[in-house]
Image: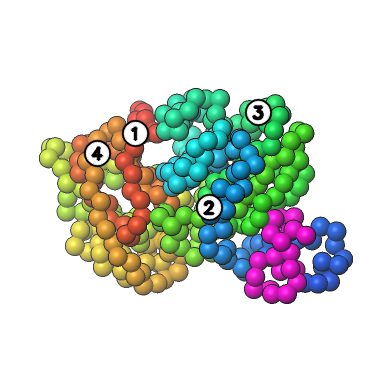
């Protein structure tokens, strides 16, 4: 029997392993929840962290039974969640994209602008894109209509925490476990809707986003609940901006005026501007108090790498799993220092400049 919250096979033997449920509950309840789901829902605690590599390896086998899939992508971390290695596996499939968390972007970004940007980035036309928010229900009607017209089963997939289970929960009475912990869903779950089966799946783990470096508790704390915060900086080449303890930003430029840029991150991420010479020491010694994340004071032990990128006003730079930087006045050379392995990506801007913005 599977847990109705996370889809994992239930067991009564090992409380430290996924799927554990005390025997009396298994006997008493018709649709028991595993202890992990119970504690996530009632205490907001993650007691059994996700085991390694849950899903990408298995994906080929699972995909055999489907022609159509919905790939769920988080628009606040587009580059971190729309991934080459996943697209590779979907080569012969009809892929639809559910782009979630639109509610977290600045309100001045219209859905039409976002949709145009997504069309280019995803390389598909608008019938294949569902821009939505599970929080304010934006876009749900369009995807509902699509699901109602489907004649065959469809698989939902994507990396952890993008909102796969939240999306599905709008269309069924089943209550999947939804939480800000990465890897909430552990097994494949079939949901009957509008005459077809929709399959929820465990999130695919990533290892190249800043969020991946954090403990599950800290990830849950950082995870956006409110709109991204926006901070504007105007610095010269003697200064540095620290964004959390994992990212340092410096600039070099020839133009007469100082570069201006804005950084968009989840609300709990802190910023600190300082003299260039002091920056590294602050990153080492103030991780977890002045500089969040991490969420607790700790000595960070990473090898850092500096990425140098030429940018102008047309561009944004995504720092995967942390946020993105939008250029207000350029051109300049942007130097971003992050732990080795974290991906930094220059992209065409999602947010166009506007008066007063
Ligand atoms: N602001 C916002 N939050 C969302 C949205 N969709 C999901 N969330 C939140 O994101 C977190 C993860 O949601 P889930 O539905 O559990 O994500 P999942 O993709 O099923 O995650 P795994 O099962 O871990 O792979 C939860 O805290 C949700 O409340 C959205 O559209 N907007
Ligand atoms: Mg889930
Ligand atoms: Zn469960």
Q: Sequence order check: which comes first, mark 4 or mark 1? A: 4
Q: Which of marks 1 and 3 is in front?
A: 3
Q: Sequence order check: which comes first, mark 3 or mark 4? A: 3
Q: Sequence order check: which comes first, mark 2 or mark 4? A: 2
Judge by depth and name the residue closer to the eye, 326 or 232: 326
Q: Does the magenta stretch include residue 4?
A: yes
Q: Sequence order check: which comes first, mark 3 or mark 2? A: 2
Judge by depth and name the residue closer to the eye, 12 or 254: 12
Label 3 belongs to which residue?
146
Q: Residue 311 carries which label?
A: 4
Q: Residue at point 29% right, 32% down?
A: 314
Q: What element carries label 2?
A: loop
Work out how far the residue at label 1 is from the one at label 2, CA to CA, in angstroms. Answer: 29 Å
List x then y, in percent, for residue 209: 42, 54
Label 4 close to label 1 by CB (< 8 Å) = no
List x then y, in percent, for residue 219: 50, 59
Q: Give the range drawn in magenta.
A: 1-21
Image quadrant holding the N terminus, namely bottom right
Q: Can residue 141 be seen in this view?
A: no
Q: Residue 348 carries which label?
A: 1
Q: What element carries label 1?
A: strand
Q: Residue at point 36% right, 55% down?
A: 342
């Amino acid at each position: 029997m599977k847990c109705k919250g996370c889809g994992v096979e239930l067991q009564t033997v090992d409380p430290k392993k996924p799927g554990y449920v005390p025997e009396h509950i298994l006997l008493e309840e018709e649709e028991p929840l595993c202890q992990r789901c119970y504690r996530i829902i009632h205490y907001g605690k993650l007691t059994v962290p996700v085991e390694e590599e849950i899903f990408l390896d298995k994906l080929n086998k699972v995909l055999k039974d489907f022609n159509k899939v919905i790939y769920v992508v988080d628009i606040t971390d587009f580059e971190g969640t729309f991934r080459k290695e996943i697209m590779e596996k979907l080569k012969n499939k009809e892929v639809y994209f559910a782009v979630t968390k639109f509610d977290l972007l600045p309100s001045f970004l219209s859905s039409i602008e976002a949709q145009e940007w997504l069309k280019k980035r995803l390389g598909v036309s608008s019938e294949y894109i569902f821009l939505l928010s599970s929080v304010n229900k934006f876009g749900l009607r369009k995807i509902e209509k699509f699901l109602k017209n489907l004649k065959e089963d469809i698989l939902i997939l994507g990396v952890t925490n993008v909102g796969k289970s939240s999306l599905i929960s709008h269309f069924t009475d089943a209550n999947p476990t939804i939480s800000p912990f990465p890897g909430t869903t552990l097994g494949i779950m079939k949901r009957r809707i509008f005459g077809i089966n929709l399959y929820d799946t465990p999130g695919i783990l990533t290892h190249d986003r800043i969020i991946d470096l954090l403990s599950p508790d800290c990830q849950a704390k950082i995870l956006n609940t409110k709109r991204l915060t926006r901070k504007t900086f105007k610095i010269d080449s003697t200064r540095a901006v620290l964004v959390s303890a994992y990212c340092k930003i410096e600039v070099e430029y020839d133009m007469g005026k100082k570069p201006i840029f804005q950084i968009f991150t989840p609300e709990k991420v802190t910023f600190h501007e300082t003299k260039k010479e002091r920056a590294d020491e602050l990153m080492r010694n103030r991780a977890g108090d002045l500089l969040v994340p991490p969420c607790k004071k700790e000595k960070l032990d990473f090898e850092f790498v500096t990425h140098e990128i030429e940018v102008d006003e047309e561009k944004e730079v995504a720092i995967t799993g942390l946020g993105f930087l939008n250029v207000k006045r350029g051109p300049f050379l942007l130097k971003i220092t992050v732990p080795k392995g974290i991906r930094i990506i220059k992209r065409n801007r999602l947010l166009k400049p506007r008066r007063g913005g």
